[in-house]
Image (cartoon, grey):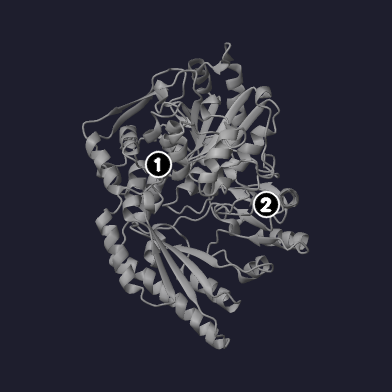
Amino acid sequence: MRQLIEQQILPRVTKPIRYQGNEFNSVHKDWGKAQVRMAFAFPDLYEVGMSHLGLQILYGLVNDREDLLLERVFAPWTDMEDLLRRHNLPLFSLESYRPLRDFDILGFTLQYEMSFTNILNMLDLAGIPLRAAERSDSFPLVVGGGPCAYNPEPLADFFDFFVIGDAEEVLLEIMDTAKAFKQGPSGRIAKGDFLAEISRVRGIYVPKFYEVSYNASGGIEKIEPVNPRVPAKVVKRVVKDLNTAYFPTKPIVPFADTVHDRVMLEVLRGCTRTCRFCQAGMIYRPVRERDQETLLKQAKELVRNTGHEEISLTSLSTADYSCVQPLITSLMEEFKNEMVGISLPSLRVDAFSVDLAKEIQKVRKTGLTFAPEAGTQRLRDVINKGVTEENLMEAVAGAFAAGWTTIKLYFMIGLPTETKEDVAGIAELAYKVLKKGKEILKEQKSKKSLKVTVSVSSFVPKSHTPFQWVAQDPVVMLQEKQQYLKSLLKDRHITYNYHDARLSFLEAVFAKGDRKLGQVLETAWAKGCKFDSWSEYFKYETWLEAFRECGIDPEFYAYRRPGFEETFPWEHLHTGVSKKYLFEEYQKALQAELTKDCRLDRCPGCGVCGDLNVKLLLQRRGKGGAL
């Protein structure tokens, strides 16, 4: 099959390098010697998927074992898909060019709700029945993980099981269990026995072992296990100490340009800032930091093994890392002769320091991005962003004074309790930033041109957050707010970007959806929906047709304001953060009352440390210590 694809297919597609799979550090194992074979599937393009740290972690983790094998597959672009279908060729893995149906396990990472149609498309292109109930033992087990697995119900019909939590903590356990259930001359996994066994493992959710019943209003009545041996609540798996956890220091180096073409060094996991809209801040708790010695050692190996010229210090909020300044100083000293730059992709305005930015820009200067999220202090307090206008102005003033002339600002519209004044506040803040920049450049007698980019997304209420009780603004209202803001941002030095509100609406539907949405998803895909997050392929009217044909009202999920007692579709999946705490945070939001970061203040009682038996793991000037 490789020869056919290389000779007849790849010369006819754009970017054939997406499908060649022979990159530096890729692993090509003897298929016959591996006892369990898994394909890691990313339901978007190669360029997007290869920037995903989770892929690199699991790829290295599994392939370090001699008896196991993990290969990659990405969603093929439409030209590639057309040629595969025309030649009746199945979707294949990059390393061995094996059809996906030959693998024992096919694992999808679920990063974004609007990639769900790509999952169905990849299964179909692989010749694998979409629904788990229609797949015999001769097909791979299909598993999902990642942030969207915290409400996987719209996908429940299509997956055999889900991983809830840190996958590196449980994946080898899954594959070892699979090895024990391979049987017969075909060597396929006995799925029934395997699922019965794996469903008792912490962090594993097998949808078919849970029954969902609905009330007269269409909401969830209850979710109960149908098998007494499976837990009533599936509790997430968590890596307690990142210093001892597996981390890949020999990642694959793509030949093609990717979204993030650099080494990724994960300095910490989790965030306890309690931004009330942020799902990641809730599901990845608690904060666990790596110590400096470990990070320096990993950085040296990463640079030596890849040749990359940039190290990205990744996390939800890297400037919060307890030892960020000495770490960066050490990294700059280590790599000063190799012209290896350091970048911080995520910066809070209250954690920004010009000295820090100057340090990381010694090799090359890039733009700075800040995320005030809301235009007024009142609304920033509602979402518990914990930053002030003064913080922002100090940060940008420092940046302009230090020579930066390009600043990006991220905001959301449609946040709970938002008023017209809050939307106008975004424009006012952008003009204040621009004015500050002009003043500083004038003082410096600089003739450089300023550029302030205002990027605005629409708020999407997510599961497991204080705002899971919030109704999303209707599409028309979001569009009116977008246009109102556009009318206020007229300066040529300000660039205004905003997202399609209709896409945000569908994202909210699937983020808060239940199992009934599976039929809508399949119908929309059958009508041609795929690559929904790519504007040229987004078919909003087709989606609405699918909802109508299935007799399901999407507004029920996005626009309804549920009560506290309502059972959510994700109620049987436990992150460690209690529902009571989330509701208290929602009530505090309505009063614009702040909650402080538990790293710096008292424990607010979210419940995660006690329920999961974990602790905050913070580093103090290079000496690790659990708090």
> Which amino acid does the dot numbered 1 rest on?
Lys
Instruction: Work out whether residue 201 or residue 159 is closer to the camera in this orientation and state it.
Output: 159
Q: Pointer 1: residues within 10 angstroms few (<14), some, or many (20+)?
A: some
Decide: is 294 above or below 2: below
Which x, y percent locates residue 111?
48, 43
> Which amino acid does the dot numbered 2 rest on?
Gln
Which x, y percent locates residue 31?
65, 26
Instruction: Work out whether residue 359 or residue 531 is closer to the camera in this orientation and state it.
Output: 531
- Please report the residue visible at 38 percent of the width from the left and 53 percent of the height from the top: 535
Instruction: Indicate left or right for 267 with 516 as reference.
Output: right
Decide: is 177 above or below 335: above
Q: Could you tell which of marks 1 and 2 lies nearer the N-terminus?
A: 1
- Please report the residue visible at 31 percent of the width from the left and 61 percent of the height from the top: 418
Residue matched to label 1: 580
Residue matched to label 2: 619
Q: Secondary structure at mark 2?
A: strand
Q: Quadrant of the N terminus?
A: top right
Q: Residue furthest top?
A: 184
- Please report the residue visible at 54 percent of the width from the left and 81 percent of the height from the top: 448
Instruction: Indicate left or right for 269 with 278 as reference.
Output: right
Q: Quadrant of residue 385?
A: bottom left
Depth check, mark 1 against mark 2: the one in front is: 2
Q: Residue furthest front?
A: 8
Residue 421 shows in the view: no
Instruction: Indicate left or right for 405 with 359 as reference.
Output: left
Q: Pointer 2: residues within 10 angstroms few (<14), some, or many (20+)?
A: some
How many numbered marks appear?
Answer: 2
Instruction: Work out whether residue 375 or residue 491 is closer to the camera in this orientation and state it.
Output: 491
